[in-house]
Each structure stands twice: as C-alpha cells, then as structure tokens.
Amino acid sequence: MRRGDKEISERSEMDAIIRGAQICRLAFAEGNEPYMVPISFGYDGHALYFHTALAGRKIDFVLANSRVCFEFEGHSELVDHPDIACKWTYAFESVIGYGEMLELTEPADKIHGLNQIMRQYSGREWPMEAKAVTGTRIWRLEIETISGKRSHIKTG
C-alpha cells in the first residue's frame, strides 16, 4: 500500500468491517471485459459465500474466469471544507481482496453456505427448504489476499 499511514494491518479490524457491511462488491473479468456487481454475502472468517440464480451474467463470468476481486466499505462520510474546494475528501474504511470462486454442489455444503449468508443479516441459522437448496447456486470464495485502508477516521 502506497500510504502506510492509512493501512489497516490487523485482520480483526478488517473482519469487523466485513461483518458490518451490508453489501459486497464482486469484480469479474472475462477477456478484457470487466463486470462488477453488488451482492449479498456471508462470511465465516476465512471465506465469503454467495448465492446466485442457476444462470445469468455472473455465472457466465465466473465460469470463464473464477478469479475475482471483492470490496467492502464501512463508515464512509463526506468531509467538507468551508473555503478550499481541494480540501473536500471522504472519511472511510475499506477492505479489498482476491480469491477464487468455487461452486458448492453437495447439499450439506450448500446449506452451510446459505446459512453463512443468513447469519450475516439475521445473526442466526435457518432451516433450509429443499427448493432453496436445489434452486440456487452457492459459491464459496476462499480469501487468498486481503488488505484494509482507513482514511480520516477517528479511532478511540
């Protein structure tokens, strides 16, 4: 990271940003065409979980290239300046990482993935209907690299 003073080096701080996020942005690439999408997610401390329809643009991209980039943001706030335009900025926290998308196909693995997603938003596990398990594709993204950045956030 170019600005070491803004780096979040503690994994626990990055985990807190991920756990506090409502949306994950996933970036895909096929050939020289990029595609980014906001998506709901689950997180177990090691991997991210996503669900998709059985077919669609995300599926086309991930099947062509399973390497993806992900992004989360937290605590963003505009910081203005009353007199100097170039002093306007943003206070923010962000986490960016890379990994490979793997499809979960075993029913028990799919249920685990779906429950990671539900836990992110509801704080608990849920019984899963067979239709939900068979009617969706579930993906696990094992985090290979991750970094965090904080700018103008007062801590403590």
Image (cartoon, rainbow, N blue to C red):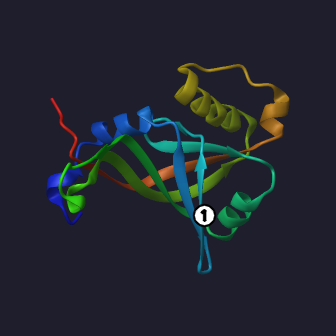
Q: Residue at x 29, y 42 (%)?
A: 11
Looking at the image, residue 88 sits to the left or right of residue 34; the answer is left
Q: Position of residue 119 (x, y in %)?
A: 56, 26
* Viewport quadrant of the N terminus: bottom left
Q: Report which residue position mark 1 lands on.
A: 66
Q: Residue at x 67, y 66 (%)?
A: 61
Q: Position of residue 142 (x, y in %)?
A: 50, 50
* Viewport quadrant of the C terminus: top left
Q: Position of residue 147 (x, y in %)?
A: 32, 54
Q: Position of residue 74 (x, y in %)?
A: 38, 40
> 139 or 33: which is nearer to us?
33
Q: Residue at x 58, y 42 (%)?
A: 49
Establish if 34 lies above or below 143. below
Looking at the image, residue 107 sits to the left or right of residue 36; the answer is right
> 37 or 142: which is nearer to us?
37
In terms of image quadrants, where is residue 20? top left
Establish if 153 lies above or below 146. above
Q: Residue furthest bottom?
A: 32
Mark 1 Cα-neighbour bin, 10 Å: few <14, some 14–19, many ≥20: some
Q: Amino acid at mark 1?
A: Ser
Looking at the image, residue 40 sits to the left or right of residue 63; the answer is left
